[in-house]
Image (cartoon, grey):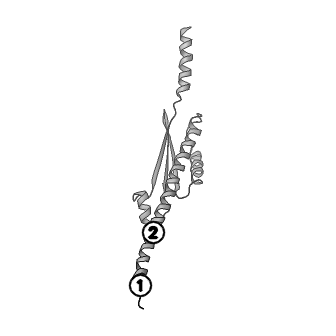
Amino acid sequence: MEKGGYYTVEAVFIVTICIWVVMALLYSGLYVHDRMVAISEMNQKLAEKFQRGDGGGTSEWQDEVRKSIANKLMLMRIKKVKVKQGVLSAEMTATYDLPVSLRGIKSLFSGGRQYMSLAVERELVNPVKYKWDYDILKEKGNR
């Protein structure tokens, strides 16, 4: 009985393609998880710092935030966190890269760029406080 080896060759191609698909799905799940965790942490850190009126973000605080975010991530590596405070808002930008050795999957997420960034902006306006101050001033003016 003679049997051909073409089933083996086809199986090698199919299994290889399946492994690539599974790897892409796993990496995409980790990437989405890391983006959501990073955005959530950045938002929380901005709220903690600026809603209490602690002032601007120093470089030590920014480094502490970078380490705090990096400890919760699985795939992304946070390179730098930068905070810019305006009159009515504060913005935090995190620069990161993906340590993925598979070029096809990495370019799928990064678009060919080496470093990517996430930005979160938070308003510093507290409408309740302004309303309270307005009401107090208005009553003083009527007396």
Residue 123: percent from left, percent from top: 50, 35
Disc 1 target residue: 5
* Between 44 and 1, the one nearer to me in the picture: 1
Q: Residue at x 56, y 58 (%)?
A: 74
Residues tagged 2 and 1 counted as in contact (Cβ below 8 A)? no
Q: Residue at x 53, y 29 (%)?
A: 126
Q: Quadrant of the C terminus?
A: top right
Vertical relation: 79 (above or below) 21: above
Q: Crowding near pointer 2: few (<14 within 10 Å), some, many (20+)?
A: few
Vertical relation: 39 (above or below) 3: above
Disc 2 target residue: 18
Vertical relation: 9 (above or below) 119: below
Residue 50: percent from left, percent from top: 56, 36
Residue 135: percent from left, percent from top: 55, 17
Q: Amino acid at mark 2?
A: Cys
- In this view, which residue lies farthest toward the top? 143
Q: Secondary structure at mark 1?
A: loop
- In this view, which residue lies farthest toward the front? 1
Q: Residue at x 50, y 57 (%)?
A: 29
Residue 116: percent from left, percent from top: 45, 54
Residue 141 visible in image: yes
Vertical relation: 115 (above or below) 101: above
Residue 57 visible in image: no
